[in-house]
Amino acid sequence: MTDTTHEKFKKAMQAAWEDSVLDREDLEDLEIPEPDLSFLEEEKESKAETEMNLDFLVPAKKKSCRLSRFVKIAAVLCLVFITGSAASIFWNSDSSYGVKSVIQNVKHFFSTEEPEVNENGVETLTVTDWNKVEDGKKVVGTIYVPEYIPEGYEFQEALFENAQGVQQSIFYTYLCGKKELKIQIQTWHGDADAYLLGEAFRSPISGREMYLDESDGICTISYAEENRNYCVFAPLSKNEVLKVVEAIKPR
């Protein structure tokens, strides 16, 4: 198939799964949803009108068989993928969350821009393009972004995690050569204790109580506010790290 046909096929399969509804009771008798593949027939007819009927070309009937076999193989791959997801996620989760996990992983299978769910039920999404960082809202709802980054550091990736609604985390990584600047924002729902490393000090910028740790050339500054923890660590001065911490804002 051409790249264009491949993309159409992928979108048709994804649309079929998005429209499907799975119940725990009938998961064992799961049937593969039938995608709309009418565009393949249209392409075949168009191609037949423009191509010469040469002996070395594959007969139309055989082409049809190949297409049918391809669709079946794709469907079987989807079924294997879903079966594996169900085995590791569905039966270890409540019914509603288990079904959502399976459907979400099918979406991720067709598009890496969709979040995925691991065997522990944690929903994750990794973004390597800063222009797409707001995709993280699919996982954590409100995102928090640093509005100040020291000169020379370039964005590498952002990881968004949602542990079944109990804990939501955002991790940013920036590089300056081999030097790393890391930012971590964690939100807790329910009772949780915050353990912050270092000595307490009062920020001269906001007046917040923060904690400072300087060891092995790495400066770490963290603080807790309501049900959220903020932490930045990098091989930078205290003032530079403090400016990064204070510039983390909700979006």
Image (spheres, helix red, strand yellow):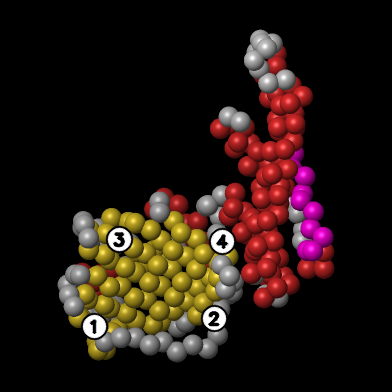
- Residue kind at label 4, given as amino acid type: Glu
**Residue 154, image x, y percentages:** 28, 55
Mark nearer the N terminus (4 vs 3): 4
Res 213 label: 1
Asked if disc 2 and disc 3 are in contact, CB closer than 8 Å, the reply is: no
Asked if disc 1 and disc 3 are in contact, CB closer than 8 Å, the reply is: no
Residue 151 position (above or below residue 231): above
**Residue 210, image x, y percentages:** 30, 83
Count residues near mark 1 (Cα–Cα under 10 Å), then give few for <14, some for 14-19, many for 20+.
Answer: some
Mark nearer the N terminus (1 vs 4): 4
Q: Give the residue number, with chain letter if any, for mark 4.
A: 116
Of residues 25 and 143, the one drawn nearer to the viewer in this rendering: 25
Mark nearer the N terminus (4 vs 2): 4
Res 189 label: 2
Magenta: main secondary structure equals loop
Count residues near mark 3 (Cα–Cα under 10 Å), then give few for <14, some for 14-19, many for 20+.
Answer: many
Q: Give the residue number, with chain letter if any, for mark 3.
A: 174
Q: Is residue 21 left or right of residue 202?
A: right
- Residue kind at label 3, given as amino acid type: Tyr
